[in-house]
Image (cartoon, grey):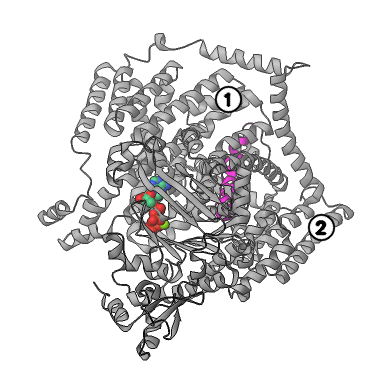
Amino acid sequence: MAVAGAAAQSLPSSLPAPWWRGRPGAAVLVVAGMLLSYFGWKHHWAWPAALEWNSFSPHLDRFQAWLSNNRNLPHPNIAFRIFNGFANFLDDLVSWLTRLFYYLKWSGTTALGTLVVLRFGGRKAALGTLAAFASFATLGLWDNSVQTFALMFAAVGMSLAVGMPLGVLAGRSATFNRAITPILDAMQIVPAFAYLMPVVILFSVGPGAAVVTTMIYAVPPAIRITALGIRGVAPNTVEAATALGATRWQVLSKVQLPLARRMLLLSVNQTILFALSMVVIAGLIGGTGLGDAVTNGLYTDPAFAIFAGAAIVIMAIALDRATEAMANRTDPAQRHLTAHKAHVLRAYTAACALVVVAAVVLGHVFGAGTVWSRWTAQDWLRTYVQRALDYIQNPGTFLFRNLTNPTGNFLVQHGIQPLRTFFIETPWPATFAGLVLIAFLLSGLRRAAIAAAMLFIVGLVGEWANAMDTFSQVLVATVLTVIVGLAIGVWAAESRTVSRVVRPVNDVLQTLPQLVYIIPFIYLMPVSGVPGVVASVLYASPVMIRLVQRGIEDVSPESVEAATSFGATRAQVLLKVKIPLARDAIMLGVNQAIIMVLAVVVIGGLVGSGALGYEVAQGLQRNAFGQGVIASIAILALGIALDRVTQGRGAAGARSES
Amino acid sequence: MSTSTTGAKRLGSSSGNPLIRAEGIWKIFGKNADRVIGTADAELSRAELRTKTGCVAAVRNVSFEVWPGEVFVVMGLSGSGKSTLVRTLIRLIEPTAGRVEIDGHDVTQASRDELLQLRRHTSSMVFQHFGLLAHRSVIDNVAFGLEVQGKSKAERLARAGEVLKLVGLEDAANQFPNELSGGMQQRVGLARAFAVDPKVMLYDEPFSALDPLIRRDMQDEVIRLQHETGKTMVFITHDLPEALRLGDRIAIMRDGRVVQLGTPEDLVGSPADDYVSNFVRDIPRSHVLTLRWIMREPAAGEADGPTLDVSTTVRNAVPVIAASERPVCAVENGRVVGVVDKEAVLMAIAGEGD
Ligand SMILES: Nc1ncnc2c1ncn2[C@@H]1O[C@H](COP(=O)(O)OP(=O)(O)OP(=O)(O)O)[C@@H](O)[C@H]1O
Ligand SMILES: [Mg+2]
């Protein structure tokens, strides 16, 4: 022990000052104070009505009414006309695309999708696409899939149309980049669930609203990755082009964009995945298709919801692989296009186009359906899924008795419930001061001030109790995420085998839509709040694992060597050198995890998690706009507060890492 | 080695106008850079200026002229401001002060359009790190300048093919830059610059990234191209042998200033200060100095020995001088301008190393 201690001390300045010394003590004191006031003044100090802005909700309702009245006048004024035009355009875009696919018939749609991938992405990717189509048919979800595809295409197109130009601008102008970065940061903190209400108020329920929601979610990464790509172009190539007299436009179109090609395609790929992960939520506000099937099925037809969820996952994986393959195969530096090859490729393209046309024509001649409906395995599959569901939910089974039920109950009884009681029943000044103090200890004065303002807003709009409820769920889920992330991340960093296993699992988990995580647990652990918590742990863990693993792998070998040379065991090296040195990465992981957890926990409001998410769900389902918007604001404020608190001191610049 | 100063004929050519005229160029990086010039601060050393104002004076009050057909070399250690200087010539970097004229046009005052025209037709540049476009084949890289000018595809490919032949890369036309060796990549860079048939070629340490053997090859290439096309060149290097091999005149820079500007002989024969003499210390003088440098007035009756051109280097003159009983006559344009005897040669060679 003494030797290892010496080793740790002998490490040069690369070992950070022990930040926890002193501060953890203070934090424990703060928590003790909160506990004390909990036991002393339980129930006595709920958030006072005097500090609530009660008329806010009716104001919002009136605003919504005013908006819809003015919009639906026979002759709305110019501002509304422009706005309506935009909303209608989005609606039309989606329905136009849907009709296009219908017109192509199922035969033409399949041929188009598969052959485009075949031509640009190669045989393997095309097979994957074909398999995806086949599984939509098998699941009996062809129509839903086509609708989702149309919705997604519109959303991705619009997101790129907005994101790419802005990204190019941000890549070329440092000033613009600096101006836009905080906005992007903010957009990425907000849980998607929180902007559903405002979007619905502005655009009313329909495909247009679904597209807008998706855009809010998908545009920031599109901008970021595009900007990164443009900035990554070697300055000397730009200079060489300028020296030859290229105009700014020529430099952009002939040098920067083509050289940033990989990143631009990555940004397309990511936008598609982001958009897909929103389709389920979009189903809540009028996006028809698979998302719709999931959200409705949750209550009425669980097996169907599971099929739709599976179809989304299949679509996500197929699209991811297809776009990646296309990005690789079309790289000019890899392709070596000679005149002859170009000729052959042109012929190939023509042949593909011909086959697509033939498929469409044949579809019309033989009267193929607009959607595949001839044969599906849905009913057959349904019996099995239903049987599995019955088994899972049967209280008599081993699984239920010994695994899922106790786990769920344990989480509720020893995690969520006591924490919720604690946060809600502790006098609000004590909770408020305690949280702000902890924010100060973790992240410094400025961020603590922001957190305080945000918490105050939460109380002001009258959501203190609900927010504390949500917060307790977030806390439980985050603690679990950190435990899982640390354990697996450290293990993966130390063992190549584990790393090899974990990585593809992480890849798949990261492409899944948020709500899809929840579905299985609704049936596995049907106790209030638990599905949301467990799903959020699954959703946030991959990022945590990745960051922990990277942080530990990045610890400089010299530090490890120094410790080893003093005779530290592997465990000592890990605990005394690697984990402390990976502190920044771990802290960043906590920061990202807590935001991701919040996003899923509030979605859990749809399925019995209660609290803020439930308020939003009610707002959506009952047209209670004021209520929904207020809960959204509280979610947003809570999100910002949690983000600031966990940013840590001086980790502000680290966000762009993910 | 003895290919040096092919441009002797051009040296005194004060006939006509210089192709490039740079007057009092300053480049100061940093905030409020334009307030430094003209104040006492401008006279501070670079380090002092940086501590005092935070500005870096990369180029300080540099003036020179480059004549048509001349190879003008700018030499100096890393950080002496060479790259910055050459970039101010076509305003890839805006000079803070000073005036540049190329081919009779005032570059500093040029509008955006005029500047584009200048960059497209009058000058072209070769870069240390090549700056090739990785997404284009070799021939498309070479044709890039013509494409930027808006030439038709057929026209630019034809011209690019010609130029590729000139640099010996016709077989690599359809390859991509990342498949070529460094030397070949820089040949592409050369070809790209040549393709637009510029009047002035600017080279920014084009061969520094190449290994020595390839570098020699490339220098030969430049000398050959220069012979064949007679282009005017501004050539940046930090390598003195390279400077002496290529340069008709050489400007030596230090901390942003030109400390000496002259022919290779001037530098080797009479370095202006310790900095320069440190540079040229290891250069064999006999390889650089010409008869002009060591000749003396012919005494009566001496002007009938064997003749050598006045621009012959001492080294190349040695066999003739050694074989001759009489002093050798140095001739310029058929006229005897001086004589060289054995003593002078010995002195020149003995002077080496001090
Ligand atoms: N954009 C810039 N901003 C601030 N300082 C700069 C900038 N570019 C160059 N400098 C400074 O100007 C000085 C001259 O740089 P320059 O690149 O011209 O030197 P160089 O002689 O070409 O050196 P090298 O042989 O390394 O290429 C250096 O001190 C450099 O740090
Ligand atoms: Mg340089």
SS for dot 1? helix
Q: Main secondary structure of the magenta part?
A: helix
Query: Dot 1 corresponds to which residue?
Result: A198
Please tell me which residue lies in front, B268 or A410.
B268
- The reply to whether the magenta stretch includes residue A275 is yes
Q: Is residue A479 left or right of residue A110?
A: left
Q: Is residue B186 left or right of residue A500?
A: right
Q: Amino acid at mark 1?
A: Pro
Q: Is residue B329 magenta?
A: no
> Which mark is on residue A299?
none
Residue at 60 percent across and 27 percent down: it is A199
**Residue A441, image quadrant:** top left
- The spot of residue B33 in percent (x, y) is 40, 38
Q: Which residues are magenta?
A: A259-287
Decide if residue A472 is on the left or right side of residue B5.
left
**Residue to which mark 2 is pinned:** A359
Kindly identify which chain the residue marked by label 1 belongs to. Answer: A
Q: Residue furthest right?
A: A365
Q: Earlier in the sequence, mark 2 or mark 1?
A: 1
Residue at 30% of width from left, 76% of height from top? B348
The image quarter containing residue A308 is top right
Residue B37 location, x and y as percent? 38, 38
- Mark 2 residue CB less than 8 A from any atom of ligand 1: no
Query: How far apart, in angstroms, are the residues tagged by discs 2 and 1?
Result: 43 Å
